[in-house]
Amino acid sequence: MKKTFSVNLGNRVYNIDDDAYMRLKEYLDRIESYFSDEKEREDIINDIEMRLSELFSERLTASRQVITLADVDDSIRIMGDPSEIGGVKGKSEPFKSHERYGGRRRLYRDPDNRVFGGVCGGLGAYLDVDPVIIRIILVVLFFAFGVGLLVYLIMWIVVPEAKTTAQKLEMRGDPVNASNIGNFFREEFDSVKNSFKRKK
Amino acid sequence: MLYTLTEKPNTMDFENAKAQMRKGVLEFCILSILSKNDAYATDILNTLKKSELIVVEGTLYPLLSRQKNAGLLSYRWEESTQGPPRKYYALTDKGKEALHELESSWKELIEAVDSIISSN
């Protein structure tokens, strides 16, 4: 059994499996990030959605009513990778998840990346440094001058924990908007899925 | 090992040149297809695919958008018997002019290249 979504693609309604929906959404987002000019981007996305919609409708029959991952993958193959579509013209680099878009960063403690209170994890996100490096510096500070522990305890008390998704995005310096929250949930979803796979 | 190091940049440049060339030719062909009949994107795609000019379908859309924004094409929505309305593209006067110019420079180019190839 699979959960399905109902989507409007090029003015037609499709029922689509959740994994297929994720793939399609990710694909369209990637295409979108390839075109910097807003007017152009809108045209292209609309046209591509129309065409994908046509490709989907060709695959559905009376006995087959749901778009599956295989349908999406095949259609993407026909349509081509965003780098091929953008081709030589694609001036803007494809979107990278660690890129910052001028969102102001705030210092929080990171509950997802912690040994004790998440201070080093939060500092790492704030300074864009691997938290492990911060931990090593702190431990060295502790043994060399004996101040590391005190600093840590004070920060644990003073710095708030990032609890909500918006706070976690602020911590990383990503602007809080719908698409970022969507990305964040997808990453979260993937990491939960992966940790589950590892346990198995 | 050594030959892969020297080979690689060359093949990449070659790929890029091929992509550029294909793109220029594609733009010319789109105008030419539309000069015969107004068409919607899938009609254009089918013609291009028949002549194996296009590898992935997606490449068409940025070209259409760019030509439209350059004032070479216009479009209108037309009802369709199968599914939602379709976006029909047509050549503008500016597009027709551009096509004429491209046609003559295409012929010149072919002759020039042919004369070089055959003299070698």
Image (cartoon, rainbow, N blue to C red):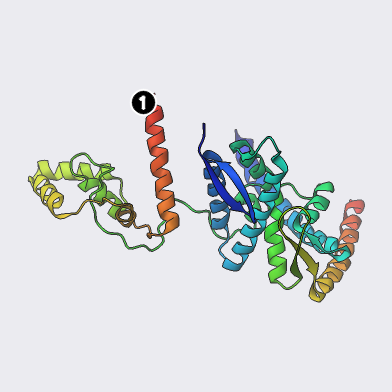
Type of amino acid at the residue the image marks with label 1 = Lys
Which residue is found at the position 38% from the left and 43% from the top? A188
Which residue is found at the position 7% from the left and 45% from the top? A146
Which residue is found at the position 77% from the left and 65% from the top? B89
Toward the front, the furthest residue is A62
Left or right for B86, reference B117: left
Q: Position of residue B40 (x, y in %)?
A: 77, 59
Of A4 and A165, nearer the camera is A4
Of A167 and A172, nearer the camera is A167
Q: Which residue is mark 1?
A: A199
Q: Position of residue A89 (x, y in %)?
A: 64, 60
Determine crowd level at label 1: few under 14, some 14-19, many 20+ residues with C-alpha closer than 10 A. few
Q: Position of residue A53 (x, y in %)?
A: 67, 50
Q: Is residue B88 above or below residue A172?
A: below
Of A161 and A129, nearer the camera is A161
Q: How many marks?
A: 1
- Residue A89, visible in the rendered structure: no
Toward the top, the furthest residue is A200
> Which corner quadrant of the image does residue B100 belong to?
bottom right
Which residue is found at the position 90% from the left and 55% from the top? B114
- Residue A151, visible in the rendered structure: yes
The quadrant of the rendering that contains the N terminus of chain B is top right
